[in-house]
Amino acid sequence: MTVRAVLERAVQAVERWQLLDAPGYQVEHALSLTFLLAGRQARRLQDVLHGVWLGHPLHPALVTVPIGAWSAALVLDGLDATGRGGPGAGHAARTVVQLGVGGAVASAATGLTDWQYAHDEGRRVGLVHGALNSTALGLYTWSLTDRARGRAARARASAAAGYALTLTSAYLGGVLAYRYRLGTDHADRSNEPRRFVPVIEESELTEGTPVAVSADGVPVVLVATDGGVRAVGGSCPHQGGPLGEGWLHRQELVCPWHGSRFDLETGEPAQGPATAPLPCYDTRIRDGAVEVRRRARWRSPTAITTVEEASR
Ligand code: FES
C-alpha cells in the first residue's frame, strides 16, 4: 500500500467518525459562550484572530512559528544528545521550545476561531487536528518542565513525540485547507466580464436591496444606493455564501451565512470572518439597463455613468 493510500484511509476514518460530532458541538458552544461573555469586544477579537486586518487568515501564518521553532529544537536536541552541539545546545533547544509553545498557543486561538464555521466531515477533521495539536502542546510544555528540572533525556523524548504529533496534525491541516477549503478564498476571481455587459433593467432595482445577477456567468450583486448602483461579487470569500440574499447594514453588505460585512465601494471586509475583499465591478446605465464590467483591483471606482454620458 502506498503512503498516499495509507494517509487517505486515515483521513477517511476521521471523516466518518460520527462520535466526534457531540464533543465538536460542545466545543463550539463553549467557544460561542466565551465570545458572548466577552461582550462588545468579542467581534473585534474574532476579527483579529481571523486575520481581517491581515487580508488573509492569520492561522496558517502563525502555525509556521511552532513548526519552525520545534524543528529547530529537534535538531538542537539531537546535537545535544550526541554531544556535538557544545555547551549551548541544550539551552538553545529550551529557548526555541519556549518560542514554539508561545506560537502554538496563539495559533490554537486562531485555528479554533476559524474552525467554528466548519461543517460535517471538515468539522471532525478540524477537531482531530486541534486535539493532536493540543496534545503536542502539552508534550512540549511537559518537556519544558523537564528541561528546567535537568531531566534532559526525558525532555528530548517528549519533545520528539510532540514533533511527530505536530507533523501528523499538519497533514490534517492541509486537508482542511485544500480539500475543505477552510480559510481559502471562495470569491469568484474571474477577470470577466472585461467589457460592459447588461445584467438587469434599472427599474427592477430598489434602493438598498441587494439583487443577485449573472454577468456572463459570473455571480454579481447589485445594490442601488443614493450614490448610484454598486456592484460586487455575489459569492462570499469566506465560504461562498450567497450575498444576493444578504442585506445592507450601515451601507455595508452583510453575508447571510456568518455575518461578514463588506464595503460596497471597495469590496473590503469591514467585519469577518471573511478576510479577503469582494471583487468589484464598474457600473453604468444604458438604455435603461444596468451594465457591469470587472474592475481591476488596483483601479479606483469610476463614477456611475449616466444615460447622457453614455450616449456621448
Ligand atoms: S460565507 Fe461565511 S461570512 Fe459569508
Image (cartoon, rainbow, N blue to C red):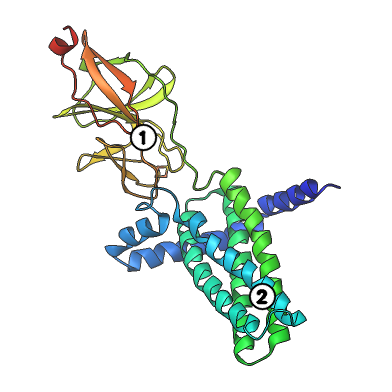
Q: Is residue 83 above or below residue 15?
A: below
Mark yes or no: residue 142 visible. Answer: no
Label 2, secondary structure: give it. Answer: helix
Q: Is residue 105 above or below residue 218?
A: below
| Quadrant hosting residue 63 | bottom right
Indicate if the residue with disc 1 has its beta carbon within 8 Å of ligand 1.
Answer: yes
Front position in the image: 34 or 236:
236
Give how far apart the Cα atoms at labels 1 and 2 are: 51 Å
At 69% from the left and 86% from the top, the residue drawn is: 152
Q: Position of residue 198 (x, y in %)?
A: 31, 13
At 68% from the left and 66% from the top, the residue drawn is: 165
Residue wearing tag 2: 76
At 56% from the left and 66% from the top, the residue drawn is: 66
At 45% from the left and 56% from the top, the residue drawn is: 58
**Circle 1: residue type:** Leu
Tell me the number on the disc at residue 243: 1
Q: Position of residue 141 (x, y in %)?
A: 59, 79
Upstream in sequence: badge 1 or badge 2 = 2
Indicate if the residue with disc 2 has its beta carbon within 8 Å of ligand 1.
Answer: no
Front position in the image: 88 or 146:
88
Q: Position of residue 133 (x, y in %)?
A: 60, 66
Q: Is 174 situated left or right of 110 in this image?
A: right
Label 1, secondary structure: give it. Answer: helix
The quadrant where ligand 1 appears is top left
Mark yes or no: residue 134 visible. Answer: yes
Q: Is 223 situated left or right of 169 in this image?
A: left
**Circle 2: residue type:** Leu
| Quadrant hosting residue 225 | top left
